[in-house]
Image (cartoon, helix red, strand yellow):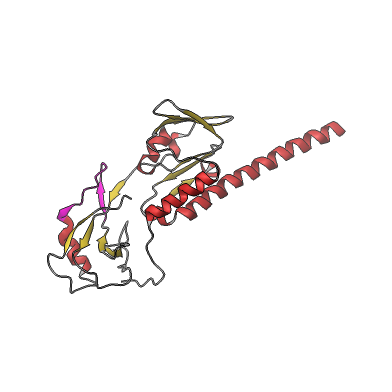
Amino acid sequence: ALLSPSSGIIDTHALMLAYQGDVEAAGGAVVLRAPVERARIGGDGVEVHAADGTALRAQWLVNAAGLGAQALARATEGFPADRVPPLYMAKGNYFALAGRAPFARLVYPVPEAAGLGVHLTLDLGGQARFGPDVQWIDHEDYAVNAASLGRFYTEIRRYWPQLADGALAPAMPAADFHIEGPAQHGVPGVVQLFGIESPGITASLAIGDHVVAMARQRRAAAGVRVYQRLRSRSMRSCL
């Protein structure tokens, strides 16, 4: 197993409330239950159409729709279809430990293909959860696969041999990066976030900073082009 003394857990609900407060303090709004059906990219920005008929226009569209990101990208008129990656779905099963956990830290085994292995995490209440494994699926399915229980006992006993039979019970699974901006796909005003898995919540501040940097870089480049055009016109008028 790997020792990571600085690893920890966060209150995801409190984090999302803090994000909402930041957005609203900056004059924005968080609108729930308003699915976006399509978008259209034009010369004056991006037009977004919601299912209730609402249409919004913005300079930038950041597609962070999770498992629906590919579908929204394909429903965006003016965005090249060959820049939309295929969707491969995998889920991670979790099992909770019945009783008190004997660990004070998170425990990570050596990572496996496509995942971190069956590791131990502690929730805010101190309960231990083991997982996730990696199960490839062809449709959305959040039910815990009880057939994987035997493998969990085998994997966990590699770093905790004292785990007793019958100590595990199914737990709520965690819903599980490919980030492209105009410099990558060539479409102004659009940033696509594909394949954002469960680490996306703890990396959300860094992802946000990266998206903002993309927008600023594009704006600065546009400003240089405008300056060059104006300077060229000024020089021609002098001649």
Q: Position of residue 24 (x, y in %)?
A: 50, 44
Q: Position of residue 155 (x, y in %)?
A: 22, 66
Residue 177: tell me if it is visible: no
Q: Give me the residue at 39% from left, 60% from top.
A: 10
On the picture, is 95 further left or further right than 43?
A: left
Q: Quadrant of the C terminus?
A: top right
Q: Give me the residue at 32% from left, 45% from top.
A: 88
List the single residue furthest toward the right: 239
List the single residue furthest toward the left: 165
Q: Quadrant of the N terminus?
A: bottom left
Q: Give me the residue at 20% from left, 70% from top.
A: 157
Q: Position of residue 238 (x, y in %)?
A: 87, 34
Q: Position of residue 36 (x, y in %)?
A: 41, 33
Count of labels in the image: 0
Is 136 magenta? The answer is: yes
Is 102 magenta? The answer is: no
Q: What are the residue bounds of the magenta stretch?
A: 134-147
